[in-house]
Image (spheres, rainbow, N blue to C red):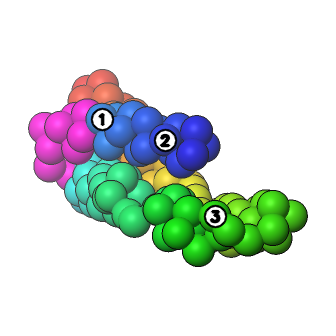
Amino acid sequence: MRHFEGLDSKAGVLLGFSGVLVALTTRTPTPVGALAAFAALLAIVFALSAYMPRRVPTLDVLPLRDRYLTAHERFSRLHLLDTKIEMIRELAGIVREKALRLRIGLVLLAISGLLLIADQVATISVEARP
């Protein structure tokens, strides 16, 4: 769960930086600037998709209590452990998907930043010509 929440925090940071790059790219309406803005907007989409709330597996203890209160202790412990293992497997899939979306968003953010730098260098070199 800590990793899951950590990914949410990273998605928020990615969202913030992508928003800043969108704001920076809109002041120079060049083709490269437009590509940088588009890449930053895609990064925002991936950050939001990673940040979206999802159902995570939880342990509902009331049915366990009702079913296994009178059962043998070993059987109850084994069933509880199997339930926890299944929950971890399910959560691992959700975390992998979330992490993949964040990786894609980070790559898009990096591409946007590089395009923005290239656009600024090209603009400065054109303005510097006599």
Mark 2 or mark 1: which is in front? Answer: 2
- The local secondary structure at tag 2 comes to helix
Q: Nearer the viewer, residue 92 or 128?
A: 92
State the residue position of label 1: 16
Mark 3 or mark 1: which is in front? Answer: 3
Identify the residue shown where x is 68% and y is 68%.
Answer: 70
The residues bearing labels 3 and 1 have C-alpha atoms spaced at a distance of 50 Å
Pick whichever of labels 3 and 1 is earlier in the sequence. 1
Q: Is residue 63 above or below residue 110?
A: below
Do tag 3 and tag 2 residues touch (Cβ < 8 Å)?
Answer: no
Residue 69: mark: 3
Side of 110 relative to 83 (left or right): left
Pick whichever of labels 3 and 2 is earlier in the sequence. 2
Residue extending farthest to the front is 70
Residue 5: mark: 2
Identify the residue shown where x is 59% and y is 74%.
Answer: 67
Q: Amino acid at mark 2?
A: Glu
Q: Nearer the viewer, residue 107 or 37?
A: 107
Q: What is the chief secondary structure element of the magenta stretch? A: helix
Highlighted magenta segment, given as a residue range = 18-30
Q: Can see residue 12?
A: yes
Residue extending farthest to the right is 74
- Look at the image and say whether residue 89 sits in the magenta stretch: no
The residues bearing labels 3 and 2 have C-alpha atoms spaced at a distance of 33 Å
Q: Amino acid at mark 3?
A: Leu
* Residue 88 rendering spot, x and y as whole percentages: 67, 62
* Residue 4 rendering spot, x and y as whole percentages: 54, 48
Residue 50: mark: none
- Displayed quadrant of residue 103: bottom right
